[in-house]
Image (cartoon, rainbow, N blue to C red):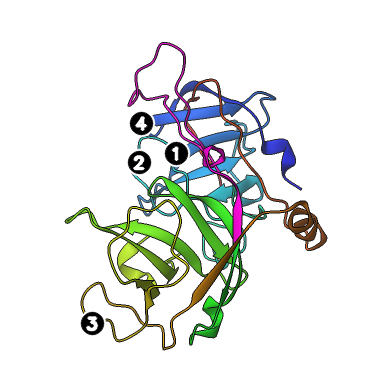
Amino acid sequence: GQHAINGTYRSNGSHDGAPVYVHASGAFRILRYRFAQAGNAYWFITRWDLKGPTHSKDDFYRTGRSEDAQPPASWYDSVTTGGSKPLVFGKIAPTVRLCQAPGESLGHASSSVSVDQFKRWSCVVTGAGESKANGLYLQSGLYDGVPQYMNEHGVTLLRFRFKNTANAYWFFSERDKNGNDGKDRDLYRTLERSESDRPPVDSWIAAPAPKQPRVLGGAPPPTISWQAATGEEEEQDKLIENDAVDMSCPSYWTSIQSLGPGS
């Protein structure tokens, strides 16, 4: 499992113009790495020690393409990347929270947020015409500042905010593995805009949507039933060799020097 990745990461330099964060053990790092040939950058959680060549076997988790100056809450694992490069081998993507250091103001480079400010929930989705949207959803990191959820088919249940209008809706979506929002396949969405921390039980719409944003999932729309995550579910994760990783809040965020993870 990847439980050793849990814990405090502290700033220790920079790479690719962004902070790099080092685990208290010194064995793991969170850093942004840019591939020289393509010019694309990703955040990685890696055991690469910044010495010598890089290898994908060192990389546990990654994000989609990112120019963000801080590591995001939403990550991909070996399942949710769908085998697309850069490859990673970690099970069940972690939650990374940015924490405010003593004496720092919010918005400072080392500030952080975390999913464990929310109670951990799971939900069961039934009745959707698009069968892959049905099933058990487990909490998997944050998106738009609130928990997002994922099922065994790789469908993500998340609140998405449009940059141009700042309007947010909850979606069931098959997300693009490279982080290109425009290539997401959105199956269902809430009828109205939403600022709720959790998606509604009902009031979902299927295709054809009466107005934008459009969705592609066939009728009928889904229904959600909620439950607090239990120890039994955590044990079930272990049985299928999916070790959920919950990144603890650093006392303050971390950074490092040049080099990068493998692809």
Task: Determine crowd level at label 4: few under 14, some 14-19, many 20+ residues with C-alpha closer than 10 A.
Answer: few
Residue 155 numbered tag: none
> At 66% across and 50% down in the image, what residue appears?
57
Q: Residue at label 4?
A: 17
Residue 122, picture quadrant: bottom right
- Residues packed near mark 3 inside 10 Å, few (<14), some (14 to 19) or many (20 plus): few
The residue under label 2 is 68
Marks 1/4: CA–CA distance: 13 Å
Mark positioned earlier in the residue sequence (3 or 2) = 2
Using the image as rendered, state which of residue 15 and residue 69 is in the foreground.
Answer: 69
Asked which secondary structure carries label 1, the reply is loop
The residues bearing labels 3 and 1 have C-alpha atoms spaced at a distance of 37 Å
Mark 2 / mark 4, whichever is N-terminal: 4
> Tag 4, which secondary structure?
loop
Q: Nearer the viewer, mark 3 or mark 2?
A: 3
For the residues bearing labels 2 and 1, Cβ distance under 8 angstroms: yes
For disc 1, the neighbor class at 10 Å (few under 14, some 14 to 19, many from 20) is many
Q: Is residue 103 magenta?
A: yes
